[in-house]
Image: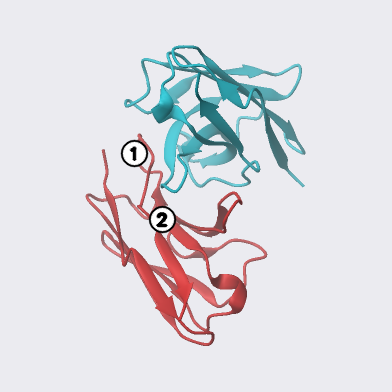
Amino acid sequence: QVQLQESGPRLVKPSETLSLTCSVSGDSVNSGSNYWSWIRQPPGKGLEWIGYIYYSGNTNYNPSLKSRVTISLDTSKNQFSLKLSSVTAADTAVYYCARVPCSTISCQADWFDPWGQGTLVTVSS
Amino acid sequence: DIQMTQSPSSLSASVGDRVTITCRASQRINNYLSWYQQKPGKAPKLLIYAASSLQSGVPSRFSGSASGTDFTLTISSLQPEDFATYYCQQTYITPITFGQGTRLEIK
């Protein structure tokens, strides 16, 4: 059974960098069959895709956040991480990580499953 | 970006009702369409992938269909545990985008 678990600081000051880690069990982040993704959801609002990373280290980010986002892999710990710089109150959200199976020769992203339980990160001084 | 427009935004229904939620993509997405159920304080749960394939373990009262850029999630007979918010999502072209959500409430 594949499980993902987010961890990291729950409170971040404005202008600082938000850092989260997703620990994966039951699958390998070194697998060529999946992307590993971050998604966020502001309180009471809808879902926003942040980006994903492939085992090769290739990344794809939402253009709306691209200038501030870095997603990286740590294969030795079977984890992947999110860094979001220069945060403001608008970045307050529940942050989720998820596995994204991919298919076809070009590794077309399929669907998001499973998801981590999510972690609420608040940006406040 | 591909816009995913869900309708209705909210819906009141009773246990046993048949419910349909629609999602329209702003351009062709080649059936790279998934449906998720989210309950308060929980992560989204995958229900349907590839527009009409039922995820393992999901009750058969859930079904999905597609017609061009229009997609439908149907719950054939609502159960108490189905009252939640439902999201559609396209993964055909990045940025990956979600519908705004449909809140299904008890009448």
Crowd class of label 2 (few under 14; some 14 to 19; many from 20; radius 10 Å): many
Crowd class of label 1 (few under 14; some 14 to 19; many from 20; radius 10 Å): some
Q: Nearer the viewer, residue B53 or A61?
A: A61
Asked if residue A88 lies left or right of residue A76, the reply is left
Tell which subunit mark 2 falls on: B
Q: Is A84 drawn above or below residue B65 in the view shown? A: above
Q: Which mark is residue B40?
A: none
**Sequence-first disc among 1 and 2:** 2
Q: Nearer the viewer, residue B47 or A65?
A: A65
Give the residue at mark 1.
B93
Asked if residue A89 lies left or right of residue A6, the reply is left
Q: Position of residue A106 (x, y in %)?
A: 44, 33
Q: From where the camera sits, is residue B31 visible? A: yes
Q: Which chain is cyan?
A: A
What residue is at 52 percent from the left and 65 percent from the top? B84
Amino acid type, label 2: Cys
Q: What secondary structure is found at the residue carrying circle 1?
A: loop
Residue, far bottom:
B16
What residue is at 61 percent from the left and 72 percent from the top? B81
Q: Nearer the viewer, residue B59 or A125?
A: A125
Where does the C terminus of chain B fall, quadrant-wise? bottom left
Residue, far front:
A125
Cα–Cα span, label 1 and label 2: 14 Å
Give the residue at mark 2.
B88
Amino acid type, label 1: Ile
Asked if residue A4 lies left or right of residue A110, the reply is right
Q: Which chain is red?
A: B
Mark 1, mark 2: which one is toward the viewer?
A: 2
